[in-house]
């Protein structure tokens, strides 16, 4: 049993979970309600579906004149460009024109023509997103540019919600935004009666093509988990499957995985790195892990049997329920 506070935002449901005995701590539940309310404000700032949002105002005006977003939004844009540099452009918030060209903005995928891809690519490139720390201003260097924080916004929301809870003295909690983003702090059980050796929070990993089906279970403590994949948003064209995660450097969906889950110290970085490494594929993910180790990664790829997947891992994972067809790289 848990204490749960939920909010619908960013196209999904955010859930804050507290240990069951937190119900008796009014400060904990009050803090959780405040954190849940925060995600609604974050959505109002970051959504591309409202002309009044900070991101929409940037997209509408940043080529013609400087735009001055809030400190929190500017900080997120700054971190996004840093992550673009770290991933050599495999993660790029300026890839919005490509997402639109492929029809995924409205969740109606279609294969664009080579010319449409070329035109979209001409408007993409984090190097052309100009951020000035001196006055916290944002400019676009190319006309037609736009940003979309869909691949990092939920992670930012989780981090800000977690920070608020900790500021209020709440250290045992789990927050998830749908099936793709989770942050866990402290322990699920706050006494040894339930768990002789507390390992954090039990987290279920969804099947990449059947999200209602559980693929595996693991313990997560003081870490964030993010999953990138094409299991839910995709379309078929002339016998080929195209997923919604597009490589911003080529303009086409890329990678050999169905899903990639990574664990990081914070949810913002986890969201972005999962997206970048998904388009890079399994080999590049292993190379990245060897050079810049992070806690762990879980990769799934399709097999010749429908809905049966092969699972490969990097790093050490505390399994509760180990996935079937599990293998580790040599």
Image (cartoon, helix red, strand yellow):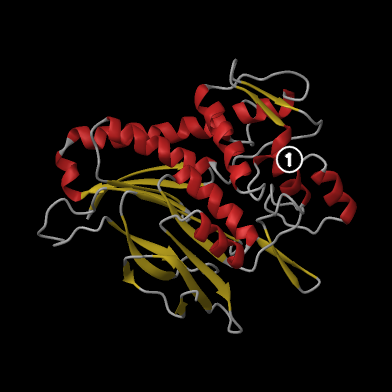
Residue ID at (83%, 51%): 117
Residue ID at (36%, 50%): 223
The correct choice, above or below, for 112 with respect to 140 in the image is: below
Count of picture labels: 1
Q: Which residue is mark 1?
A: 125
Q: Residues within 10 Å of mark 1 (few under 14, many from 20)?
A: many
Spot occupied by residue 196 in the image (x, y as percentages of width and height):
13, 62
Note whether residue 53 is visible.
no
Quadrant of residue 158 within the rendered picture = top left
Q: On the picture, is 60 further left or further right than 259?
A: right
Spot occupied by residue 186 in the image (x, y as percentages of width and height):
25, 48
Q: Residue furthest front?
A: 291
Spot occupied by residue 46 in the image (x, y as percentages of width and height):
57, 33
Residue ID at (46%, 75%): 328
Quadrant of residue 255 within the rendered picture = bottom right
Quarter of the image for the N terminus: give it: bottom left
Spot occupied by residue 125 in the image (x, y as percentages of width and height):
73, 40
The correct choice, above or below, for 321 with respect to 189 in the image is: below
Between 79 and 302, the residue placed more toward the observer is: 79
């Amino acid at each position: 049993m848990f204490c749960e506070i939920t909010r619908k935002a960013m196209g999904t449901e955010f859930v804050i979970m507290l240990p069951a005995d937190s119900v008796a701590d009014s400060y904990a539940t009050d803090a959780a309600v405040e954190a849940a309310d925060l995600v609604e404000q974050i959505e109002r700032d970051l959504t591309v579906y409202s002309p009044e949002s900070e991101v929409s105002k940037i997209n509408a005006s940043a080529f013609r004149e400087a735009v001055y977003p809030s400190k929190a939004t500017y900080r997120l844009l700054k971190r996004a460009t840093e992550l673009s540099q770290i991933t050599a452009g495999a993660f790029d918030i300026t890839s919005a024109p490509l997402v639109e060209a492929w029809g995924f903005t409205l969740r109606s995928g279609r294969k664009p023509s080579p010319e449409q891809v070329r035109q979209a690519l001409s408007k993409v490139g984090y190097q052309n997103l100009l951020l000035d720390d001196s006055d916290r201003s944002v400019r676009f260097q190319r006309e037609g540019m736009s940003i979309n924080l869909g691949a990092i916004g939920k992670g930012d929301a989780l981090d800000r919600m977690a920070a608020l809870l900790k500021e209020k003295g709440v250290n045992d909690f789990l927050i998830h935004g749908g099936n793709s983003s989770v942050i866990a702090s402290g322990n699920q059980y706050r006494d040894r009666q339930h768990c002789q050796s507390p390992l954090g929070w039990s987290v279920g990993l969804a099947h990449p093509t059947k999200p209602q089906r559980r693929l595996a279970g693991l313990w997560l403590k003081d870490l964030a988990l993010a999953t990138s994949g094409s299991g839910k948003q995709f379309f078929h064209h002339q016998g080929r499957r195209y997923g919604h995660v597009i490589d911003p450097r080529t303009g086409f969906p890329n990678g050999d995985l169905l899903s990639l889950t990574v664990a990081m110290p914070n949810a913002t970085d986890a969201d972005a790195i999962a997206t970048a490494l998904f388009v890079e594929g399994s080999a590049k993910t292993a190379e990245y892990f060897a050079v810049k180790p992070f806690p762990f990664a879980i990769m799934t790829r399709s097999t010749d049997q429908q809905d049966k997947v092969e699972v490969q891992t990097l790093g050490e994972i505390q399994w509760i329920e180990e996935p079937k067809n599990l293998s580790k790289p040599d």
